[in-house]
Image (tube, helix red, strand yellow):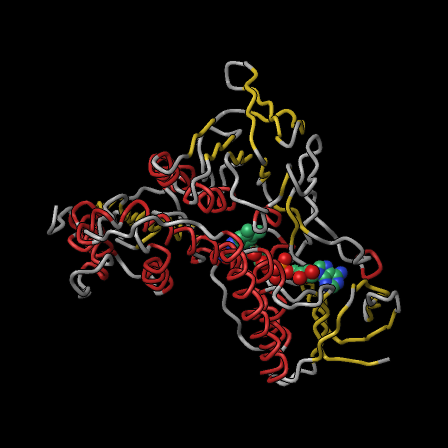
Amino acid sequence: MSEFDLIIIGAGPGGYVAGIRAAQLGLKVAVIEKYSTLGGTCLNVGCIPSKALLDSSELYHLATEKFAVHGIKTGKVSIDFPQMLKRKDEVISNTVAGIDYLFKKNNITRLVGHASFVDKNSVSLKDEKGKTTQYKAKNFIIATGSKPTELPFMKFDGKHIISSTHALNLPKVPKHLIIVGGGVIGLELGSVYGRLGSKVTVIEFLDKILPTMDHELGKTLQRSLKKLNFEFHLQTKVKSAVVKSNQVEVTAENKKGENIVFTGDHVLVCVGRRPYTEGLNLENAGIKLDTRGFIQVNNHLQTTTSHIYAVGDVIGGMMLAHKAEEEGVYAVEHICEEIPHLNYNCIPGVVYTWPEVASVGQTEEQLKEKGITYKIGKFPFKASGRARAAEETDGFVKVLAHPETDEILGVHMLGPRCSDMIAEAVLAMEYKASAEDIASVVHAHPTFTEAFKEASLMATADRAIHI
Ligand SMILES: Cc1cc2nc3c(=O)[nH]c(=O)nc-3n(C[C@H](O)[C@H](O)[C@H](O)COP(=O)(O)OP(=O)(O)OC[C@H]3O[C@@H](n4cnc5c(N)ncnc54)[C@H](O)[C@@H]3O)c2cc1C
């Protein structure tokens, strides 16, 4: 039986990054992945394909809606949807090939098949022909990720009742896309099709979209998305979906208790993701799950069996690729008795709609709940010269700082290029900067980043220069 220092199960961002770090630290490492491509959800059916389609659809939207105001006449612009999907698939295969290259470069043993625990020290791998082989290791990392959650009364059929994975490969641009759930994935995929001309109806059970982020962000984004053919039905509960003559009829109940029927080409169910542990036979290795099915880990990401770690979506928390990556590195460095670092308060969250939404640290709602007082500095993009030059004046940057220490507690932004701008706020918070620190740092003019400096000035001294 082959024996390794470390076997990693799952080659998503948690698993493949852990594999590379382990190889760098000199471990004999194998990564087991059941699919033939590396990269997991993120590279194959998540972050990368969704961003490829978001970028293509944004270009179309700019050409049809925004070029004219800049004095650019394009004539008739039309969509070649098969080409858009083909380009997305090429982006996936190039990115996946990059991970193949990194595995070879780092001498990582790649094993293809489904892994399950035989006992605490060995796993069995079943390949696609049904052949099983056993492997032993001193340590393991479980990085098996998550799958889209299904509603029990409307199971995915892949055609009319669809998950995010199906939504990345629709046969054509739908006339009407119904989305259940006003969270990040639903709003991003809805934006793709809204920009390409679909009517998008979002049905959300709660009274707000983006419910886990600072509430002001969801409210403002909702206003922006309404300009993009989005219709929102909040406090509305989906009850059933019936397929009739190549359309889907979704029945939902609004807050007054009335039934509303929506008819569309597809209903995209985006109500969350569930941890994926099927067939791992965790009980053979003494690994326990929590009440929601996530693998239980301690502060060092060790499961209830201490030489078996778990990272990424399968342990819950923020279901984000960069969180999974950081945890992968943490687990490997802990195994190697290095001094790993991971600050969960400084993990940014980004929504790649347009305007973009980005956030780090505590929200106003969390601070209120914890009884922590805070001051707010807020700067609207309307007052930014760079934003006016770009015709991108929707949104704001909001800095929440402690009233006595001036330490930045949270930064929440909505506007152009916030997905990149949030990095400065993450760095500031990681190094415990005060709002005054940011206010005294020179920011190039004219850039969108000046809004962060101005919001910090507002937070620290209630004075911005440009409002
Ligand atoms: C549409 C969409 C868009 C997203 N966009 C973003 C984004 O922009 N930014 C962001 O940060 N996050 C985004 N995410 C979330 C991100 O994809 C996940 O948080 C991330 O992929 C989690 O990484 P992971 O390594 O934990 O698991 P995964 O990426 O899910 O990888 C787990 C891997 O384990 C394999 N596996 C499972 N069980 C076994 C087994 N028993 N044996 C062998 N292999 C197994 C699976 O096949 C899979 O390849 C998005 C997700 C979706 C669905």
In this picture, residue 188 sits left or right of residue 443: right
Residue 34, image x and y in percent?
74, 64
Q: In the rendered view, would you say 75 is above or below 368?
A: below
Task: Tell me residue 251's x, y (percent).
Answer: 60, 23
Work out which quarter of the rendered image holds the C terminus and state it.
Answer: top left
Res 311 seen here: no
Residue at the (38%, 51%) spot, across then down: 60
Q: What's the residue at 36%, 48% (across, down)? A: 61
Residue placed furthest toward the front: 75
**Residue 240 image point, x, y percent:** 65, 26
Q: Is residue 252 visible?
A: yes
Does residue 438 appear to the left or right of 28 in the view shown? Answer: left
Q: Nearer the viewer, residue 121 or 390?
A: 390
Q: Residue at x 88, y 65 (%)?
A: 130
Figure quadrant of the N terminus: bottom right
Provide residue 28's location: percent of width, then percent of height. 70, 83
Judge left or right: residue 316 versus residue 397: right
Q: Residue at x 78, y 67 (%)?
A: 113
Q: Is residue 405 above or below residue 187?
A: below
